[in-house]
Structure formats: structure tokens, C-alpha cells
Image (cartoon, coloured by chain):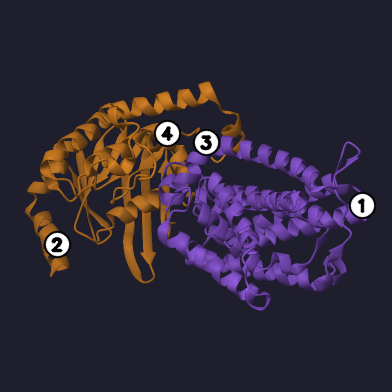
Chain colours: A purple, B orange
Amino acid sequence: MEVYILGILVTITIFALMAISLDLLVGYTGLFTIAQAAMFGSGAYASAIVSLETGLGFWGGAVAGIAVGAAVASLASIPSLRVSGDYLVLASFGVQVVFHGLFLNLDGVTGGPAGLRGIPRPSLFGWSIDSPAEYLALYLAIAVVIVAVLRRLLASSFGLLLQAVREDELVPQALGKDVLRLKIKIFVLSGAIAGLSGSMYAHYITFVSPESFDVHASIFVLAMVLVGGMGTTWGAILGAAILILLPEVLRFLPLPTMSMGPIRQIIYGLILIMVCFLRPRGLIGGRS
Amino acid sequence: MPELELVNVSKSFGGLAAVSDVSITFGGSRITGLVGPNGAGKTTLFNLITGMYPPTGGRVLFHGEDITGLAPHHVARRGIGRTFQQVRVFGELTVEQNAMLGLPEVSDSLSVGLLRTGRGRDELLERARKNLEFVKLDHRASELASDLSYAEQKLLMFACLLGLGASTLLLDEPAAGLDPTSHGPVLDTIRQLGGRGHTIVLVEHNLDVIRSCCDEAVFLAEGRVVRTGTPQELISDPELGALYFGMVEGVNA
């Protein structure tokens, strides 16, 4: 039981980082996108490939995951420089579909539908990370550092400019701000963090395959941000915790085995709808 | 050397000529009013100067340097600030944060964002407060900008421009939407800005505002300069009056 709970906490940590990375775009800057799983997946694959092919392990893989996540994000940022609102959602959906297609079909690189197996577990100064408790300690430490740096950045003048651009893109330009460069930077930062969380995921599950990185995964993370509360960081963390814990809790409901799956899905959906109705600004009360 | 010079500037949208062959010189800490009926090309002229639209012909010179077609943020950094017809403040941010946004140090630089701490931030805040003092909004610094009255939001836009450090200010209908009692503080601030050595160009429909604020006025109609003179000369010219009111009626009809 303890291993089970610790395992869930590790998963929450990984997805909380991914949700935070999306919140940078959606919550702080008002760039509504559904391509986060493309960056998460690119990071996971890059990390898996580098660690499997080069023997650089988790840390080498994580660097590759960050770099590739950032590179994919810089590509995904291109539509945002020209379009916004509904069109940006659609364009980001396109990016998501393209990357999922690449994961699925680049057999020589990604292993195709079968994915990549045997991704090495992390090690720290020669100490191998194997148990969920060790994973939790390592991943929490990484997450705390990232959240601390981000909170400092978001509280600074850079964060202020993000919020301004969220409200109005024209006035900041008239005040001498390079809004296009700002957007590219926040996409790259978001992609780097998503890529890192993808790398953490790959080295925890030790297996990657395309279905973990499809459009459902992107929407799942978007739901985390919306349920928790946009533009608050803590909201993204809370949203990740709730959306990962909820199915686990529902698992313990006394339901007949046959109908368990669909009923759980329905309850899960109803709870999400209730949150939207009762707390439209998210549980923490982020921006609307 | 003039501060801002338009040389044969033109702009057409499809087949429609919004601005045709306009040449005007602004400078010398003067307040110039652009007057003319709706559709005369006044706001388009602002958009051409500030890089919001590229002109289809002609050049825009600032301190003798060709700034034609530069991106809006580059034009602003060179020293041309503008306001918009509608009040555009950041309603979800505080008054103080709005004023800070004008400062050049508030930028997309990640390193500045991460490294500028304590004292650095206090210094920015101090400068933002000074600009708020100038427009007499310092006592409301920590309130949300959306809680300010319409006139106060207009003043806040001026505080943002002061932070930018622009020498030329383009003000698009600064008195529009204000009732006569709240004209006073806005017009006083414009005159004070003129007194501080800024070159100011304002677009305004209210001729009383033009008369009381401007040193000179330029009459535009159908995208062309019709006449330049003192506000009194232009306003008392029966031909321009007919043109102005005739066109206003024409538009309204």
C-alpha cells in the first residue's frame, strides 16, 4: 500500500511540473494551447533515446529532454506570433497531431507503436534510484527547484509583462516591449519544463509509447490547469493532484467489475463538470 | 532639426486612399492638434508614425533618422509614445504595476527578471510612483486599474508614457468620453507635459480642447493636409468650418 501511494505521489509530481509548464502559456500569458503532450512526449523520447544509445543515463537524458522540449516549443510558438484565440487553439492542436503522428510512425527512432523499453532508472552520485520513495525524493527536489525559480521569475518585471500581454498585446508594443520575443521565450521555457517532466516520466515508467502523448494527454493537463486555477502555479499543482488522485479513489468504490470502468469515467466527468460550474475560476481561484 | 517629420506619407487600404501625400513637421515643444472630420486619416497617421501600419509611400523621420516601417516597439524605444482612442490600461494589474510597465527596464529579459531583486525593484517602483505623482494618482497606487474612473485611467496612460521616457507624445482623442468636469485634470496634464519639453500631437474632435491646449493645428480632410495655422485661424475659417461640419453631417447622414 505504501509503495502504491508513493507511486501515485511520483506521478503527481511529474504531472504537476507538466501542468505548471502549460500554465505559463495558458494562465500567465493567455496563450491557449493544447500541444503540451507533444513537448512532454518529445522530451520523453529524447531522454529515452539518449540514455539508451549513449549510456549517459537519466541526467544526460534530462538535458536532451529539456533541449528537445524547448526546440519543439519554439516550433509550436510560430503560429502564436500570427494568430491568437480560437485560431491558436486550432494551430496548437495541429502541432499536437503532427507530433503524435511522428511518435507513432518514425519506427526507426521512436520504436513506432511498440515504443521504447528498458529505459534506465536514474542514479545520483552512483546511488541507483529504484524505489518509489527514492523517486519521490529526487523528483520532488527537482520540482521544488523549478517552482522556486519560476515563482521568482513570475514575481519579477518579466512576470508583470506576461500578465500585461495577457490583457492586451498592442499597448505593450506601444510601450516599447518586444511582444513576439516574449512569446517565443515563454513557449521555450514552457517546452523546456514539459520536456524535463517527459524525461522524468520516461525514466520512472522505463517505457515510452505514443498513446501516452496523444491529444487526450494534452487535454488532461489542460484540465489540471483549469480545475486548479489558471495563472497561480499552486493551482496547476493542486489540479494535477486532484485529477490523478480522483481515478485512484474511485477505484475503491464498491462497483460490479463489469461496469466499473464506464461508471468511473462518468463519475470522473461529472466531478469535472461540477468544478467548472461551482468554481469557474478553478479551486484556488485563479483568473477567469 | 525637427523632432518628427512626415515626408509625402501615403497609405491606401486596397483601393481606398486613407492618407495621401502628407508632409508635416512637428517639434519645438509645441502642442499640435490634428483636426478634421471622421475618416480624414488622423488616427491612420498615428498608426503610420508608430509602425502599426507600414506606409505605402513616403518617409517618417525622427530626429532626422528614417524610422519608416520600423516595428512598433522599436519606434516606442526611440522616443515616440502614443495613447489609443479607447482607454487601454491593464485592468487586472494595479495602478502602480501599470505605471511600471512603461519603464524600459520592464522587458522580456529573463536574466533581468531573475536577478533584479530588492533594491533594483524598489528603484523601479520609486520611478513609477514619481510618474503617478505627476498625474496625481499616487494615492491610488495599490488599487486595481479597473477601479479607476475613466478620466483617471486616461491619466494613468500618461503615467505609462512618462515611464517610457518618450520625447514625442501622440495622444488620440485624449478628451473623448469625458464629461466637461473631468476635462480639467486631463487637459492640465497635457499642458504640463508640453511645459516639460515634450512635443505633443493630439487628435481631437472637441474644438474647445484644441483651442485651449494647442499652439498650432493641422486641418486634414480625406487623407490630405488642407491647412495649417493657429487653432484660432483654423476655427474661424468659414471654409474649413463648412468642410468640417459638412462632412460630419455627411457622415452622420
User: How far apart in space, not on screen, are marks 3 and 2 (Cα)?
Assistant: 49 Å
Q: Measure the alpha-carbon separation of dots 3 and 1.
A: 39 Å
What amino acid is at disc 3?
Answer: Ala
Q: Are marks 3 and 2 on the same chain?
A: no
The reply to whether residue A77 is visible in this rendering is no
Q: Earlier in the sequence, mark 3 or mark 1?
A: 1
The answer to whether residue B42 is above or below residue A108 is above
Q: Do marks 3 and 1 both belong to one polypeptide chain?
A: yes
Relative placement, left or right, of B251 versus A231 is: left
Q: Position of residue B185 (x, y in %)?
A: 19, 34
**Residue A264 disc label:** none
Nearer to us in this view, B44 or B95: B95
Is label 2 or label 1 in front? 1
Q: Which mark is residue B248?
A: 2
Tell me the SS state at disc 3.
Answer: loop
Label 1 lies in what chain? Answer: A
Q: CA distance from mark 1 to mark 4?
A: 49 Å
Q: Is residue A5 above or below residue B230?
A: below
Among numbered discs 2 and 4, the one appearing first in the sequence: 4
Residues at marks 2 and 1, CA–CA distance in whole angstroms: 75 Å
Q: Position of residue A177 (x, y in %)?
A: 49, 43
Residue A57: percent from the left, percent from the top? Answer: 88, 48
The residue that disc 3 covers is A155
Residue under label 4, please give it.
Answer: B100
Q: The residue marked by circle 3 belongs to what chain?
A: A
> Mark 3 near mark 2, Cβ–Cβ under 8 Å?
no
Mark 2 in CB contact with mark 1 (< 8 angstroms): no
Left or right placement of residue B240 versus residue A18 in this view: left
